[in-house]
Image (spheres, grey):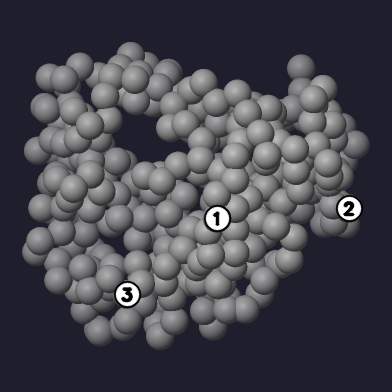
Amino acid sequence: MSTIILHHYDISPFAEKIRLALGHKSLGWKSVLQPMVLPKPEFVALTGGYRRIPVMQIGADVYCDTNRIAEELEARCPEPTLYPDGRLAQTEVWCMWAERVLMWPTARYVTAVNDDQLGAAFHADRAAMRGHAAPSKEDLERCIPLQRAQCVQLLAVLESVLDDGRPFLLGQAPGLADFAVYQRIWWLNSFGRRAADVLEPFGRICSWAERVGGVGAGNRSELGREQALEVARDSEPEPAPAVRARGEASTYVGRQMSIGTEAFAPDPVVGTVASISSNSVSLIREDPNLGRLAVHFPLFGYDLKPAT
């Protein structure tokens, strides 16, 4: 496999999901550490505007969103699989639950409890992503009891799933479902475990998390940001896969389109559609300093429309 470059920062829970996927597949990868908040000049140059972490780079191909990254890792290195027993649908449900339901109370609880460690710049950056003012210290303190209660409610659901003694969420082998849910537990355990009190009643979750964390992060070595840009500059995007989309979407190939997240931090990327399927799209963009790049996105959770 061509060299995998992961753009991330160490305390990113979504990056932890992909680090575990790399470890599960025993892959070597280059780590490029990016800032937690803007500005991110090298990162944005590579993606064309997308700012969320992590991003995977292989040559001049840039993969955005953890679910698109996981799909690509599985295609390039099918064994061991991220989808035990071929249970793709169940994996997708767990990922959506983790990243659209469990995410918010765990994110708010950890950031509020650790406000002194994260600082004003972090809160201002994340508030700007969501289009509202940064919370005050009083706002953060006021939200702690509610977010804690919501965490406990959702963790009780996860604990009940593990009641039957299964070692992993989908049975005997770990997979992407485990890594997606684990990253939220890992986040509760971050910053010296100051938010980990919500985990104390849930022994099965803690035991499961130890097993998942034991997967490790593969073979990591460090690479500088400028070196990663040089890799992109010296490469060409891989040939686009055949178009598999039906209906109107199939007419997007060759057109200038814009894609950004639906919920927040839209940060649209503009390029020419090289390929589109029922669940992903690839855009070609030209950067004045890096040359021709392909940026790959999932379709779920993103807004794809003609560039204006």
Q: Residue at x 34, y 25 (%)?
A: 122
Q: Is residue 223 left or right of residue 165?
A: right
Q: Is residue 56 visible?
A: yes
Q: Position of residue 66 (x, y in %)?
A: 54, 51
Q: Residue at x 76, y 17 (%)?
A: 308
Helix, strand or loop at mark 1: strand
The residue wearing badge 1 is 221
Say which quadrant the N terminus sits in. bottom right
- Few, some or many residues within 10 Å of mark 1 (<14, 14–19, 20+): few
* Residue 11 against residue 263 in the figure, above or below: below
Circles 3 and 1: CB atoms closer than 8 Å: no
Is residue 268 positioned above or below 238 on the image? above
Can you see residue 92?
Answer: no
Residue 161 vertical placement versus 261 (above, below):
below
x, y percentage for residue 146? 13, 38
How dense is the environment of label 3, judged by Cα within 10 Å: few (below 14), some, or many (20 and up)?
Answer: some
Residue 238 image point, x, y percent: 85, 52
Q: Report the residue marked by disc 2.
A: 239
Q: Earlier in the sequence, mark 2 or mark 3?
A: 3
| Residue type at the position of mark 1 | Ser
**Can you tell which mark lies on residue 211?**
3
